[in-house]
Image (cartoon, rainbow, N blue to C red):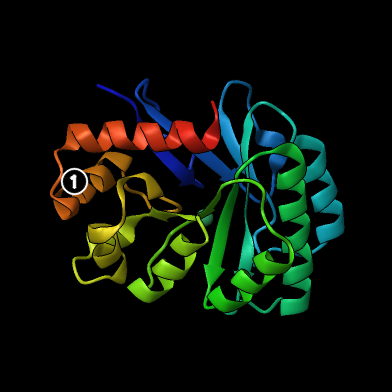
């Protein structure tokens, strides 16, 4: 079967020759294994000792196994101050720009602030808003910036905002993921093919195309 791409998971990736997963690490970076794909960065909810940990991210981010920077971003529901979150986020944008690797973004109730940061510190690399589950008007703001959206288990819920956005988004602007859910990426693909009324085979080929566009394998 052609490859399915899970662009964001925190679980040890599914063992399969035809599933390619990007394992997202925000700590314990030393567990990276050769020949796998990772995104590394400091999650806004985990910024204790961030100076030390960001140094580690910088040291490792140039490795071939690291295909993206993140997840990083802004989250209004965590206790870390927004000024600290913003400063660390900007460091990630700069690192991604330096390395030419895409950014995987975590954004919770902070889309205006996130867009403002990007206005002041433009990304020169592809930007993916992961775990998107907001209304269409917010999706449009991100898409207008050229960002990509990645959808996860929220689309298994028929009444979620993500389901509505996924129905209408252009073919070349999105990805699928499982994040920390204990769900196979194939379940997310099947559901996405139903929502978009697209044959599964076409969806698989489209997402392979999107992956190659953004992650430059
Ligand atoms: Zn995540």
Q: Position of residue 21 (x, y in %)?
A: 45, 35
Q: Is residue 146 visible?
A: yes
Q: Is residue 47 left or right of residue 210?
A: right
Residue 92 vs residue 136, the one in the foreground: 136
Figure check: 159 above or below 149: below
Please provide percent x and percent y for residue 9.
47, 46
Q: Residue at coordinates 37% horizontally, 31% vertically from top-left?
A: 208
| Quarter of the figure with the C terminus | top right
| Residue 13 visible at all | no
SS for dot 1: helix
Image point (28%, 23%), residue name: 2
The quadrant holding residue 58 is top right
Q: Is residue 58 left or right of residue 41?
A: right
Task: Kindly identify the residue that appears in the image at 48 percent across and 46 percent down.
Answer: 8
How many residues crowd mark 1 within 10 Å: few (<14), some (14–19), many (20+)?
Answer: some
What residue did someone put label 1 on?
193
């Amino acid at each position: 079967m052609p490859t399915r791409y899970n662009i964001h998971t925190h679980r040890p990736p599914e063992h399969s020759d035809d599933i390619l997963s990007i394992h997202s690490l925000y700590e314990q970076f030393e567990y990276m294994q050769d020949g796998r794909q990772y995104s590394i960065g400091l999650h806004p909810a985990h910024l204790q000792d961030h100076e030390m940990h960001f140094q580690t991210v910088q040291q490792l981010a140039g490795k071939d196994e690291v295909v993206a920077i993140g997840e990083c971003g802004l989250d209004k529901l965590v206790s870390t101050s927004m000024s600290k979150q913003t400063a660390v986020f900007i460091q990630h944008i700069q690192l991604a720009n330096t390395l030419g690797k895409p950014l995987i973004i975590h954004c919770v109730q902070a889309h205006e602030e996130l867009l403002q940061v990007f206005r002041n510190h433009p990304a020169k690399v592809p930007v993916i808003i992961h775990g998107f589950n907001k209304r269409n008007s917010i999706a449009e703001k991100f898409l207008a910036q050229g960002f990509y959206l990645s959808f996860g288990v929220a689309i298994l819920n028929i009444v979620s905002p993500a389901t509505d956005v996924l129905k209408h988004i252009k073919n070349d602007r999105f990805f699928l993921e499982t994040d920390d859910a204990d769900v196979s990426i194939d379940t997310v693909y099947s559901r996405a093919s139903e929502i978009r009324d697209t044959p599964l085979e076409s969806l698989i080929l489209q997402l392979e195309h999107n992956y190659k566009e953004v992650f430059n394998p």
